[in-house]
Image: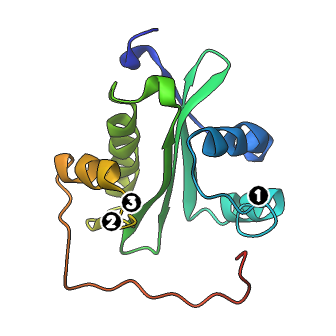
Amino acid sequence: MPETDRLEERLLSAADYDRLLALWELAKLSVRPAGRDSREAFARQLASQMQRVIGLWDGPALVGVVIATHDSRRGIINRLAVAPAYRRRGVAQRLIAACEAWFASLGIEIWSALIERWNDASLALFAAAGYHHHLDIVYVSKRVRSDA
């Protein structure tokens, strides 16, 4: 297996949708291909210019991916996934750093991630990257459709 620093960082485009979806499924992320994760939704979100999808590639294989998005004042790290064979090699840290670099280039100084309470590995990853777990903040959402 090549060293992590030899992996190529590239932005994903709508043409990479099938590879993205395959990696999310391989990494066991919850995927809603008929809703928020559909090909059409992915293309629309990319076109908004408020998000970028950063991938790490080992040759033709997408081995790590993250969605960086922002609301012009806060950067949000979403949907970070790493292929199981590449875990614990620094791939996730590189993806977080790539998000942070983009946010910083936009002058955004607050960076966040939403992590399910049961996901100890992700909580530890972000804590190691300097993120703080705020017990006084509650995430609420309203969904128009169950697959949204």
Up the image or down, 73 lies above or below 28; here it is: below
Look at the numbered disc 1 and give the secondary structure of its residue.
Answer: helix
Chosen colour scheme: rainbow
For this view, does 83 lie left or right of residue 45? left
Up the image or down, 139 lies above or below 111; here it is: below
Label 2 and label 1: CA atoms lie apart by 23 Å
Badge 3: few (under 14), some or many (20 or more) residues near its Cα, within 10 Å?
Answer: few
Label 2 vs 1, first from the N-terminus? 1
Label 3 vs 1, first from the N-terminus? 1
For this view, does 7 lie left or right of residue 117? right
Answer whether residue 12 is visible to the viewer in this image.
no
Q: Amino acid at mark 3?
A: Leu
Instruction: Read off the residue under disc 3.
Output: 106
Label 2 vs 3, first from the N-terminus? 3
Q: Where residue 68 appears, x then y in whole percent?
A: 48, 56
Instruction: Read off the residue under disc 1.
Output: 43
Instruction: Read off the residue under disc 2.
Output: 112
Comparing labels 3 and 1, the label whose residue is closer to the camera: 1
Q: Nearer the viewer, residue 104 or 75?
A: 75
Look at the numbered disc 2 and give the secondary structure of its residue.
Answer: strand
Q: Amino acid at mark 2?
A: Ser
Q: Residue furthest front?
A: 118
Residue shown at the point (78%, 41%) measured from the top left: 18
Q: Quadrant of residue 96?
A: top left
Q: Where residue 4 appears, x then y in whole percent?
A: 39, 19
Label 2 and label 3: CA atoms lie apart by 15 Å
Q: Where residue 45 appears, x then y in whole percent?
A: 68, 64
Comparing labels 2 and 1, the label whose residue is closer to the camera: 2
